[in-house]
Amino acid sequence: MAGMDQEATPGTIRMGIITIFLTGLAAVLGGLTIGFEIVDVQSLVFIFRPATTTVILIIALVSAAAPSRHYKWMIVFGLAFALVADSILMLVTDQISWGMLFFAVAALFYTYAFVSVKGFYRSPTGAIAFALFGILVLVLLWPDLENSRIPAVVYTIIFSVMGWQALGQWRQTAERRALFAFVGALLFMASITLLAINQFSSPLPEPDLLILSTYFVAQWFVAMSAGSHHP
């Protein structure tokens, strides 16, 4: 887990204990969610799945020493929209377009948070890398997207820019907190990509395990970037 950026004090130690407890709780809830998804006990999934993201949101909410004035709250708002998106996908399985819309809004909040620290990152190398990733995903999915092609292009741009700016925050600050944000952004992109492949292209083996594990871990990493007072 990330080291504290400041000297340990009773307050930061207490914050670390709270974070460890909440992380353990999220891990247990997330594991139960995935397990009940695999065995198809949906009544329990409806309880544990939103509870997992809610606990992760609380990790961001109670964090301290945010890197910029708006960073923490943009992450909290993003997690709230991710919670809504995940709930839509859980409750109404044929409404992936609405779920993707709310995930895209979450990504926009995350991007705003990343940019708020050191400004918009303009490195062409990073832009090219994420653009190539986005193009590869679109090429893979394009034949199966049909009427969803325009939204797919828009969402791909949004998530690619999110990853690019997460990289930029880390490159410009060299903070472990920013590295967490970058890892979270990459895993969020991976989770969304797996969701799209499973929905539009080829069904994945154990999709619940692959999609939910990357999604929950992604949101945890992003939440941990909301402040520097973590163990």
Image (cartoon, rainbow, N blue to C red):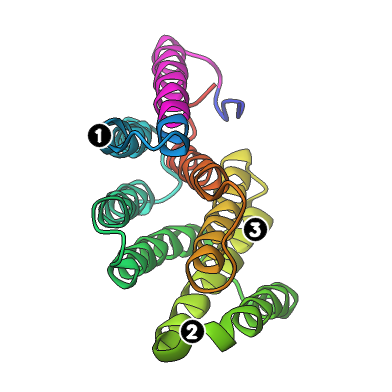
Do we see residue 209 in this rendering?
yes
The kind of secondary structure element at disc 2 is helix
Q: Which residue is mark 2?
A: 145
47 vs 13: above or below: below
Image point 49% across, 46% down: which residue? Answer: 208
Single out the mark in the foreground, 2 or 3.
2
Q: Position of residue 1 (x, y in %)?
A: 61, 26
Q: Looking at the image, is mark 2 or mark 3 earlier in the sequence?
A: 2
Asked whether 215 or 148 is in front, the reply is 148
Magenta region: 7-32
Q: Looking at the image, is mark 1 or mark 2 earlier in the sequence?
A: 1
The kind of secondary structure element at disc 1 is helix
> In screen coordinates, is 135 left or right of 11?
right
Image point 37% across, 50% down: which residue? Answer: 75
Q: Position of residue 9 (x, y in %)?
A: 47, 13
The disc label shown at residue 43, or none = 1
Q: Looking at the image, is mark 1 or mark 3 earlier in the sequence?
A: 1
Asked whether 169 or 48 is in front, the reply is 48
Single out the mark in the foreground, 1 or 2.
1
> In screen coordinates, is 172 left or right of 225?
right
